[in-house]
Amino acid sequence: MPSITKRLALLPLLAAVLVTFVVTAVGSAGPTATCTIKGTAKADVLKGTAKSDVICGLGGNDRINGDAGDDAIFAGAGGIDRIAGGSGKDRAVADPLDVVATVEDVKLTGPALAAYNFSGAEFTVGSKQFTEQLILGQITKQALEFAGAKVNNQVGLGGTSVNRAALVSGKIDMYWEYTGTGWIVHLNHTQPIPGPTAQWDAVRKEDAGNGITWLAPGPFDNTYAFAVRSEAAGGFRVVKLSDFATLIRTRPNDATVCVNTEFSTRDDGLPGVEKHYGFKFPSNNVVKLETGLIYKAIDDGKICNFGITFATDGRIEGLGLKVIPDDKQFFPVYNPALNVRTEVFNKHPKLAGMFKAIATDLTNDRMSRMNADVDIRGKFPEEVARTFLAGRGFTKQRK
């Protein structure tokens, strides 16, 4: 792999080649289209008209703004340009270093992470031990290494409390945490904040006092979810969580549930569910298993008919399990966000932009597929993370 310095040096050449090709190939007037608005070698301010324009930067740090038409915007080679689309459906070709907003279709002249250079920096990356966390840890490790950093690998370090203690004590510099977990478990609140943005903002502000910086969250919600094997769901008549009260009262022997040890004690886990809904599983009916074993146990139906799962886990679909709706909305939002020691973040504030771009791409469907790649299709987390970063244009230019 070329060094960061060499990759950055190639960007102006790549930009020049790509802009020349795209302007002649996809301009609004066809194969012979040329720039209708063109910059100079200086830092220009270029603005479109009410028509569909082809706006071309040339050099320098340009500000380029579309207008009402469906504009094609091409940033010049070199410099750091600021590009904003107009009210039309716009396209842009830009360097990874450029700042692009409100443009519907953006093509970069190189890998997105080429915009970041952490050469000389050293980070220790941790994660929890279940599949999703192993993937997120590997994404973080590989992204930082691509950007030139040295990474000490503590992916798979342990459970929630182990990673949090390691982060606070400085044994690790970062790991992915969930907003609901931060609010309920780490900050000891009993009630979640309604809405994903409000929940993230609340935990971010309060945890700042602990020397922890919460970077931008991803959109997927890995909330807890009770599940049952599909073929047995109708027989138990538990179509929503509040129905457990009737099952426990009338058919207690069928009210068997598999949980992991952590969920059995957390305020946002089984004790909280039972208190919120007003039922309690018979103690002998609560089976504690490792997280990875719960899904198969639910599907088998031998030691438990129900079990706690993660909403983005690919095994839910792979095994044909049925999720039971949380009808009284007990569980908080669990959006993922990279937690970084504030001391480390202050030295490397560009971590925010880098991982905001990555987090934005972590949708429910995408995370579920990556989890299934490991748990159902037998791939390694390292491989899945590598494919994500390359396929989404972070470490390899998207075609």
Image (spheres, grey):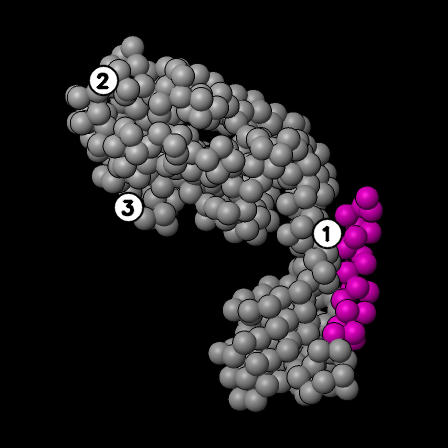
Dot 2 crowding, Cα within 10 Å, few <14, some 14–19, many 20+: some
Residue 208's mark? none
Question: What residue sits right under mark 2 in the picture?
Answer: 252
In the rendered structure, which amino acid carries the disc numbered 1? Lys
Reading the chain from its start, which is encountered first: label 2 or label 1? 2
Circle 3 SS class: loop
**Residue at the (28%, 19%) spot, across then down:** 254
- Give the secondary structure at mark 2: helix
Q: CA distance from mark 2 to mark 3?
A: 33 Å
> What residue does disc 1 label?
396
**For this rendering, which residue is in front, 59 or 160?**
160
- Give the spatial CA distance, label 3 vs label 1: 38 Å
Q: Which residue is mark 3?
A: 194
Question: From the viewer's perspective, is residue 96 above or below residue 185?
Answer: below
**In whole angstroms, how far apart are the C-alphas of marks 2 and 1?**
55 Å
Residue occupying the point 64% across, 71% down? 92
Q: Name the amino acid type tagged 2.
A: Pro
Q: Secondary structure at mark 1?
A: loop
How far from the left and from the top, in percent, is residue 320?
46, 35
Dividing the image into 4 quarters, which one contains the N terminus?
A: top right
Q: How many marks?
A: 3
Q: Which residues are magenta?
A: 1-22
